[in-house]
């Protein structure tokens, strides 16, 4: 039985669904813009906060993505109390607070305070993601959810492509020359002045971001976003004797949480770590600061392919299988080449990764019924993979060959994703009756 919105066949419902897709699409653009700023913040904060190693700089992604782990379940409780619309507006306000924290962080050049701001922004995004992902998955037939999420992905990645370009132009203007000047400064006062001047570049863009997020929160609160009964919309027909009493009785969900954890890890590695990867070849910062956008362009092509192909030509399960195989091939290509060609293979991982979230999320929440909100929150917790995998890369590359470290971190993740596409997503679902 295809999971659909209750009473989804009249003109009013179709109009409401279209309005919902527009509203959620705008929110996904916000996700993309804020999330993919991290690729720029990693080299910027390493320089501005005078960090000694790349491993320290990767605490940027750690602080941001760990917020999802700690806040996803509480987010589901908040959404049950506030409803989707109010919850989304609250999430935007929390993100605005995170942006404001960047101002005193810049004035004091405190890396810990910058990480606090990133954690708070991640908390706001956790609330938004916990609401929006199941919403877009079940606003229509679950079999075509990957297609709708691909549309959301285009909104996300278009904004994500722009964000590092815009922020890099502000924060890392003349970056290579500035890096040389700072490293060459022998006088402590001169060095401190240069670093203070660099850190202050973050104040204006993040103050503007805070204002925009507050305005968007007001807009989201007043939007025409329709309510959805997620329990009814995502229910499956099951035999009475196998009715579920706990979320842990859905093995396809538990395996899906692991899958999404690993997927976000490889996505962030390909998107946020690509600059550090390129710099390890000796490529200049003035070039590597834009590499995140190349990965996102590749993802954009992947989303377009998903919109065209799913479910008309291939199922979301098969798209996940193809994506995992491509990930293995591109990771191997990055290992066996060097310089710009190797970086190109890392950027191409964006193409391999594009359809993974659109496929994994609806496959994992299928048939959860009354457990949909909790299951979605558990999947959002899986975003913490973006915290741990890049951090592991940062530490290990200091000790071992960075290309081998990259390869050995990525390929096992893609192998598990391949398993989930073939068998994991079906675990425990044989009990559902098809209608």
Image (cartoon, grey):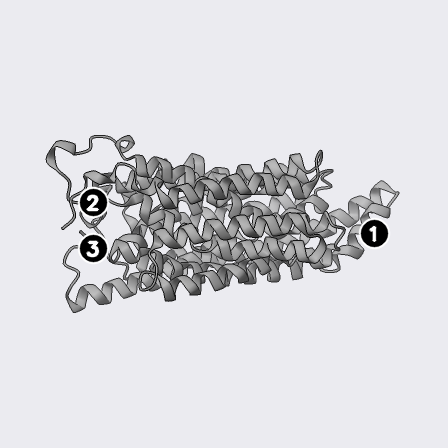
Position in image of residue 56 (x %, y %): 66, 37
Frontmost of labels 2 and 1 is 2
Report if residue 60 is visible in the image: yes
3 and 2 marks in contact (CB < 8 Å): no
Frontmost of labels 3 and 2 is 3
Frontmost of labels 1 and 3 is 3
Circle 3: element type: loop
Separation of marks 1 and 3 at Cα, in angstroms: 60 Å
**The one of 178 and 294 positioned closer to us in this rendering:** 294
Separation of marks 2 and 1 at Cα, in angstroms: 59 Å
Q: Residues within 10 Å of mark 3 (few under 14, many from 20)?
A: many
Q: Which residue is mark 1?
A: 181
Q: Is residue 343 left or right of residue 222?
A: right
Position in image of residue 429 (x %, y %): 24, 40
Q: Which residue is mark 3?
A: 4
Circle 2: element type: helix
Q: Residues within 10 Å of mark 2 (few under 14, many from 20)?
A: some
**The one of 414 and 191 positioned closer to us in this rendering:** 414
């Amino acid at each position: 039985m295809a999971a659909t919105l209750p009473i989804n066949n009249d003109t009013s419902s179709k109009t409401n669904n279209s309005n919902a897709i527009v509203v959620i699409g705008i929110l996904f653009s916000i996700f993309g813009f804020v999330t993919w700023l991290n690729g720029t913040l990693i080299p910027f904060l390493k320089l501005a906060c005078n960090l000694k190693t790349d491993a320290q700089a990767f605490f940027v992604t750690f602080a941001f993505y760990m917020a999802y782990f700690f806040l996803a379940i509480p987010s589901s409780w908040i959404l049950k109390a506030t409803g989707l619309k109010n919850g989304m507006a609250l999430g935007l306000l929390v993100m605005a607070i995170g942006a404001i924290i960047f101002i005193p962080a810049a004035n004091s050049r405190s890396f810990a305070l910058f990480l606090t701001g990133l954690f708070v922004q991640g908390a706001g995004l956790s609330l938004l993601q916990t609401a929006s992902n199941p919403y877009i998955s079940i606003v229509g037939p679950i079999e075509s959810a990957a297609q709708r999420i691909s549309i959301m992905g285009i909104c996300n990645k278009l904004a994500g492509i722009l964000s590092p370009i815009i922020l890099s132009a502000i924060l890392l203007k003349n970056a290579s020359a500035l890096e040389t000047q700072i490293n060459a400064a022998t006088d402590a006062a001169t060095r401190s002045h240069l670093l203070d001047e660099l850190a202050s570049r973050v104040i204006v863009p993040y103050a503007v971001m805070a204002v925009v997020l507050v305005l968007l929160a007001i807009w989201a609160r007043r939007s025409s976003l329709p309510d959805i009964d997620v329990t009814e919309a995502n229910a499956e027909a099951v035999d009475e004797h196998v009715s579920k009493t706990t979320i842990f009785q859905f093995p396809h969900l538990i395996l899906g949480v692991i899958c999404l954890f690993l997927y976000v890890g490889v996505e962030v590695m390909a998107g946020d770590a690509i600059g550090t990867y390129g710099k390890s070849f000796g490529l200049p910062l003035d070039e590597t600061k834009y590499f995140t956008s190349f990965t996102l362009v590749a993802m954009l092509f992947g989303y377009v392919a998903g919109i065209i192909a799913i479910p008309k030509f291939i199922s979301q399960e098969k798209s996940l299988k193809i994506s995992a195989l491509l990930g293995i091939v591109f990771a191997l290509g990055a290992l066996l080449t060097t310089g710009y060609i190797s970086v190109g293979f890392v950027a191409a991982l964006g193409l391999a990764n594009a359809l993974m979230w659109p496929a994994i999320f609806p496959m994992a929440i299928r048939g959860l019924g009354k457990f949909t909100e909790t299951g979605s929150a558990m999947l959002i917790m899986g975003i913490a993979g973006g915290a741990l995998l890049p951090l592991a890369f940062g530490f290990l590359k200091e000790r071992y060959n960075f290309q081998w470290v990259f390869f050995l971190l990525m390929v096992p993740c893609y192998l598990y994703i391949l398993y989930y596409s073939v068998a994991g997503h079906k675990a425990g679902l044989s009990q559902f009756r098809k209608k």
